[in-house]
Every structure is written in C-alpha cells, then in structure tokens.
Image (cartoon, grey):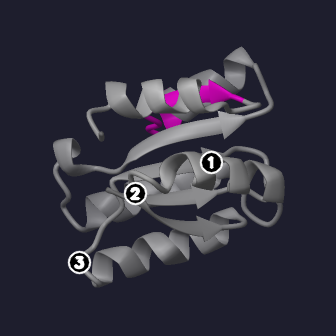
C-alpha cells in the first residue's frame, strides 16, 4: 500500500506515519498544495496512492480544496471509481457541515476526528480493504 499523509501539524503527521508505516510506504505533505503536487507526481510515476489521510484545516490550501482537486485530477486521468484513492479526512472539527462537505462535495471515503489513535485508524483502513 502507498499512502500520503497530509497535515500541517507535526505531531499528527508523525502519529499517523508511525501507525501506517508497518503496512504502507508513506509520503508526507504539510498543506493542500504539496498534497496535490505529490498526488500528480505519483500518477506520472505510475505509482498512485491507495490511501490519503487528509487534514481539513491547513494553511495555503485547506483539505476541502485539496480533496476537490485530487478528485478532479482522477477524473482527468479517467481513473475508475473503484481505483480512486481512499481518502480519510482527519480533523479536530466534529462538525456536521464539514462532514457533509467532505463526503458529498469533496468525495471523501471516510472521516475521523482527532486525536487519531491506532485502533481507530487501523479499523478504518481495514474497513476500506487496504490491509
């Protein structure tokens, strides 16, 4: 499995990386712009991401905008729905509007509220069929 961890908070990035690294080759981005760049490069290299853990609140480009752009890039490349990256939105916000926007406007696969712990993240990854 190949994963992209996108979060502006060092602690959160590190925690998710420590949980996933036994199961995935992980790349890191600190904002939405870096995430989009990494996502595009992975497609060019023909090594797309299976999983993206994406924070919503980040500087420069937030997770909602990055997610919409990632889904747009997948459409441009004619990636079938079943082969799209699984996107777990991670955020401090336990907010119904943010949840709605992430799923219905952005195309998130699932949503976890921080703090992220190993059992919660691994249960979600397993439910997505990635390990």
Which residue matches tag 2?
A: 24
Residue shown at 18%/61% (left/top)? Answer: 78
Binning the other alpha carbons within 10 Å of mark 3 as few (below 14), some (14 to 19) or many (20 upward) gives few
Span colored in magenta: 104-113
Q: Considering the image in quadrants, where does the N terminus appear?
A: bottom left
Q: Is residue 120 magenta?
A: no
Mark 1 secondary-structure assignment: helix
- Image position of 4 (left or right of 117): left
Tell me which label, 2 or 3, sits earlier in the chain: 2
The image position of residue 114, as x and y in percent, is 74, 31
Q: What is the distance, in whole Å, between disc 2 and disc 3 at their CAs? A: 17 Å
Of circles 2 and 3, which is in front? 2
Of circles 3 and 1, which is in front? 1
Which residue matches tag 1?
A: 16
Residue shown at 76%/31% (left/top)? Answer: 115
Residue 60 figure quarter:
bottom right
Which residue matches tag 3?
A: 46
The image position of residue 3, as x and y in percent, is 44, 58
Q: Considering the image in quadrants, where does the C terminus appear?
A: top left
Above or below for 122 versus 100: below
Binning the other alpha carbons within 10 Å of mark 2 as few (below 14), some (14 to 19) or many (20 upward) gives some
Mark 3 secondary-structure assignment: loop
Above or below for 14 versus 28: above
Tell me which label, 3 or 1, sits earlier in the chain: 1
Residue shown at 36%/75% (left/top)? Answer: 42
The image position of residue 105, as x and y in percent, is 51, 35
The image position of residue 119, as x and y in percent, is 55, 25
Residue 13 figure quarter:
bottom right
Q: Is residue 107 magenta?
A: yes
């Amino acid at each position: 499995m190949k994963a992209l961890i996108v979060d502006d908070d060092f602690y959160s990035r590190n925690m998710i990386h420590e949980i996933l690294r036994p199961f995935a080759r992980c790349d890191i981005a600190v904002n939405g712009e870096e995430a989009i760049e990494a996502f595009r490069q992975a497609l060019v290299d023909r090594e797309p991401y299976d999983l993206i853990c994406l924070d919503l609140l980040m500087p420069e480009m937030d997770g909602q905008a990055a997610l919409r752009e990632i889904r747009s890039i997948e459409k441009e490349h004619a990636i079938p729905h079943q082969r799209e990256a699984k996107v777990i939105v991670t955020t401090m916000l336990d907010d119904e509007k943010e949840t709605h926007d992430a799923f219905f406007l952005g195309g998130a696969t699932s949503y976890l509220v921080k703090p992220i712990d190993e059992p919660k993240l691994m249960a979600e990854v397993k439910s997505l069929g990635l390990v």
